[in-house]
C-alpha cells in the first residue's frame, strides 16, 4: 500500500508514526518518574526537633502531622489517624498540647515558624483542645512577637488571630494590642501588616490604646495609600472603626495624606477596597456632622484628610458621581450613602428635600 503513495505521503506517514512513538515514550518516562518518586519518599524520623512541626499528606489529600503516622505515637498500638476525627468522636489527640510544649524549647526561626503554623491550624480544627488551653499558652505565643525574624512574628500574629475566636482569650490577647501596633508602625512588611491588622480587627478596641493609636495614625494612613490591596482593606477597616470614636475623629481627619488620596475612589480600584473606602468616608462625614463635633471650631492642615475629602477644593463629588454607576451594586449603594451624608447633617437627615445642595461639593448644579 505504501508503494502506491507519493514520496510526500510516505513522509507524512513516517512523521505520524514517529510522533506516536515519541508521545508513548514521554508518557512511559513520566510514569517511571512518578513511580520512582513515590518509592523514594524520605523516611519518617522523630529525631529532629522539626518533626513535630512538619506535615505529611494522608489518604485523600488530608493533612496529618508526622507523629500521627507513627505507630509508637499511639497508646493503643496503631496509627492514630486524623486528630480531627478523634475529637469528633470525643477523644483528645493531645496534638495541640504537644505543639505548645515544643514551642517552649529552643529552635531555629524556621522550626518556630512551622510550629506556630501548625498551632494555628490546630486551633481552627480542634475546637475542644483549643478551648482547653490556658492564658499562659497565649502569653507563650505572644512572646514570639519579640522574635528577631519577621516570619516568626507573622506566624505568631496568625496564631493569636486564631485564638481570638475563642471569647475567653480575648482579654489576654488584648494585652498585646500595643505591641502589635508598634510592629505595624515600625516594620514595613505587607504580610506583617495584613496579619497584624487582621488580628486587631478581630478584637474589641480597649480605651487604654487610644494614645498609641494616635501615634500610629500616620502609619495606618500610609498603609491605606500603599499598593498592597489586602493590607489596604485591613487598614481601612480599622480606620473606619476608629472613626466612630469621638476622641479619635479629629486625629484621623487632621492626618496628612498624599495629594492623590482621592485615587482610592477611582472606578478602577478593586470593588472590595472601594466599598471599604466609601464606608470610611461615610463614617467620617457622619462624625463631623454630629452636633458634638460641630460645636468646636477645628483647624486642619492643608494636606489633611479633611481637606482632601471635605475641603472647598475637594473633587470627591466627581468621584462619587462616577461610582453611582459602578458595576458592583454594593459600591453603588454605598456611594449614594456617602452623597446623602455629605448633603444632610445627622440632625436634619429626615428632611432630605431641604438639604439637596447642603454641601459645597454639589453647589455647581451636579
Image: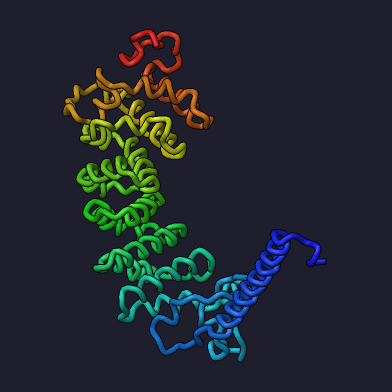
Q: Which residue is at the front of the view, 110 or 208?
A: 110
Answer yes or no: is residue 328 visible. Answer: yes
Residue at position x 47%, y 74% in the image? 96
Residue at position x 36%, y 52% in the image? 194
Task: Note whether 325 is above or below 250 in the view shown.
Answer: above
User: Is 37 displayed left or right of 218 in the figure?
Assistant: right
Q: Which residue is at the front of the view, 4 or 311?
A: 4
Name the spot of residue 343 as percent of width and height, x first.
38, 16
Answer yes or no: is residue 86 visible. Answer: no
Task: Note whether 335 is above or below 216 in the view shown.
Answer: above
Name the spot of residue 50 as percent of width and height, x first.
40, 80
User: Is 88 displayed left or right of 260 in the figure?
Assistant: right
Q: Which residue is at the front of the view, 87 or 145?
A: 145
Name the spot of residue 165 as percent of width and height, x first.
46, 57
User: Is 199 displayed left or right of 213 in the figure?
Assistant: right
Q: Quadrant of the N terminus?
A: bottom right
Q: In which quarter of the view is residue 292 placed?
A: top left
Name the spot of residue 227 as percent of width and height, x first.
33, 44
Residue at position x 61%, y 91% in the image? 77
Q: Quadrant of the C terminus?
A: top left
User: Is 93 displayed left or right of 101 in the figure?
Assistant: right
Q: How many marks?
A: 0
Task: Note whether 273 is above or below 81 in the view shown.
Answer: above
Amino acid at each position: 500500500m505504501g508503494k502506491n503513495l507519493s514520496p510526500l505521503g510516505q513522509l507524512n506517514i513516517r512523521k505520524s508514526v514517529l510522533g506516536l512513538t515519541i508521545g508513548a515514550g514521554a508518557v512511559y518516562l513520566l510514569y517511571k518518574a512518578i513511580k520512582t518518586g513515590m518509592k523514594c519518599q524520605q523516611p519518617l524520623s522523630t529525631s529532629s526537633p522539626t518533626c513535630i512541626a512538619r506535615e505529611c499528606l494522608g489518604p485523600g489529600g488530608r493533612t496529618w502531622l508526622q507523629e500521627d503516622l507513627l505507630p509508637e505515637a499511639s497508646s493503643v498500638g496503631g496509627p492514630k489517624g486524623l486528630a480531627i476525627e478523634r475529637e469528633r468522636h470525643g477523644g483528645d489527640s493531645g496534638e495541640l498540647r504537644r505543639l505548645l510544649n515544643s514551642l517552649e524549647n529552643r529552635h531555629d526561626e524556621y522550626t518556630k515558624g512551622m510550629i506556630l503554623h501548625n498551632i494555628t491550624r490546630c486551633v481552627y480544627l480542634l475546637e475542644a483542645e483549643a478551648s482547653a488551653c490556658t492564658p499562659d499558652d497565649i502569653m507563650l505565643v505572644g512572646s514570639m512577637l519579640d522574635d528577631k525574624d519577621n516570619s516568626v512574628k507573622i506566624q505568631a500574629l496568625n496564631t493569636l488571630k486564631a485564638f481570638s475566636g475563642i471569647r475567653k482569650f480575648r482579654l489576654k490577647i488584648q494585652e498585646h494590642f500595643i505591641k502589635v501596633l508598634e510592629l505595624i508602625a515600625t516594620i514595613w512588611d505587607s504580610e506583617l501588616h495584613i496579619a497584624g491588622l487582621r488580628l486587631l480587627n478581630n478584637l474589641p478596641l480597649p480605651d487604654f490604646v487610644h494614645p498609641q493609636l494616635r501615634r500610629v495614625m500616620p502609619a495606618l494612613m500610609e498603609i491605606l495609600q500603599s499598593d498592597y490591596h489586602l493590607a489596604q482593606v485591613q487598614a481601612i477597616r480599622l480606620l473606619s472603626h476608629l472613626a466612630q470614636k469621638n476622641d479619635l475623629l479629629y486625629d484621623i481627619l487632621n492626618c496628612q495624606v498624599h495629594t492623590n488620596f482621592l485615587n482610592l475612589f477611582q472606578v478602577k480600584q478593586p470593588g472590595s477596597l472601594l466599598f471599604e473606602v466609601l464606608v470610611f468616608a461615610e463614617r467620617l462625614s457622619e462624625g463631623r456632622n454630629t452636633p458634638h463635633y460641630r460645636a468646636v471650631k477645628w483647624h486642619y492642615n492643608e494636606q489633611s484628610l479633611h481637606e482632601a475629602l471635605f475641603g472647598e477644593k475637594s473633587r470627591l463629588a466627581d468621584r462619587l458621581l462616577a461610582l453611582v454607576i459602578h458595576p458592583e451594586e454594593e459600591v453603588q449603594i454605598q456611594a449614594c450613602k456617602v452623597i446623602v451624608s455629605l448633603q444632610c447633617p445627622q440632625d436634619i437627615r429626615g428632611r432630605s428635600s431641604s438639604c439637596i445642595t447642603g454641601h459645597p461639593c454639589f453647589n455647581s448644579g451636579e
